[in-house]
Amino acid sequence: MKVIEINTTSAVLSKSVLFEGIAQPELPVLLDCLDPKIKSYRKNDFIAIAGEHCEGIGIILEGEGAVIKENAAGSRMMMVVLKPGDIFGEVAVFASNPVWPSSVMAQETTKALFIPRHKLIGECPKLCSWHRLIIQNMLKILSEKAMMLNRKVEYLALKSMRGKIGAFLLEQYQKTGKTMFELPLNRNEMADFLNVSRPSMSREMSRMKAEGIIDFHLSTVRILDLETLKRMANEDQKP
């Protein structure tokens, strides 16, 4: 890789959980050992396709990638949006038959870096001290991934549109500690994540606004009636 590209890549990777604990100046040497490949994609290109062989893990360097799943009927559901520094393929990389569990689609012009599987789990011929740290970071990532998937199941188990929206907004409130916050997803992404249609979700949010439960403008949401929002989410979880 060129010097400028290495410096740009190192700046992004230094923010990735996979390289936590590794100083940015050390990353070019580590990258030389890992022998990664960088690929570019246009909007709506597939970065990875579910069911195809997984050569290793990927890391978004520029742009955004959406992790999506499709059922037998062809309905598509977005699992998560990947930002620069986020990784994908970590669930499959240690499997006996490594295949991409989900597809990843570029949401805009995107660059992704791929680290070969054997470079992660094989013995390093240079005896680099970083490999053990990378494996430890990988275990942390897998643990957090399992928790995220459990959270996704909880959303899918909610029965009503209002309950799903209420639970999602409460989660953002708990993360930020503020009643006013920026949504981490746009409307299309949020609808896909909650497994609902965008028009229906928008109508329900407008009703909640008219009832004085929330207020919103573009991606900014303010919770006006926190107790009602909590009640909406909790009642939807009752058997």
Image (spheres, rainbow, N blue to C red):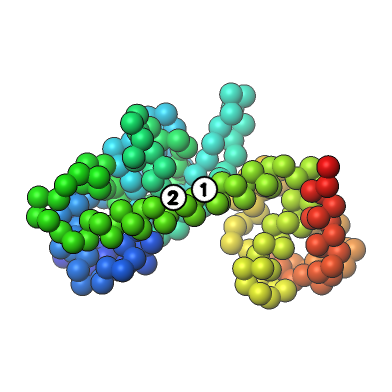
Is 179 rendered above or below residue 201?
Answer: below
Q: Is residue 61 above or below residue 182?
A: above
181 relative to 14 in the view: left or right: right
Image height check: is 140 above or below 177?
A: above
Query: 10 Å neighbourhood of mark 1: few (<14), some, or many (≥20)?
Result: few
Q: Residue furthest right?
A: 211
Residue 91 visible to an observer of this rendering: yes
| Residue 213 coordinates in the image, percent (x, y) | 84, 66
**Quarter of the figure that contains the N terminus:** bottom left
- Residue 62 seen in render: no
Residue at point 79% right, 55% down?
233
Asked if the residue at tag 1 contacts the one at tag 2, i.e. Cβ–Cβ closer than 8 Å, the answer is yes
Q: Residue at x 45, y 58 (%)?
A: 83
Q: Which three-letter amino acid code belongs to the residue tagged 2?
A: Leu
Kind of residue indicated by mark 1: Ala
Residue 42 place in picture, x, y as percent: 39, 46
- Residue farthest toward the top in the current orientation of the protein: 72
Separation (CA) of disc 2 from disc 1:
6 Å
Question: In this figure, which residue is indicated by the disc labeled 2?
Answer: 142
Image point (77%, 70%), residue name: 223
Which residue position holds label 1?
146
Which quadrant holds the C terminus?
A: top right
Q: Residue at x 38, y 46 (%)?
A: 90
Residue 76, image x, y percentages: 59, 35
Horizontal side, residue 46 vs residue 168: left or right: left
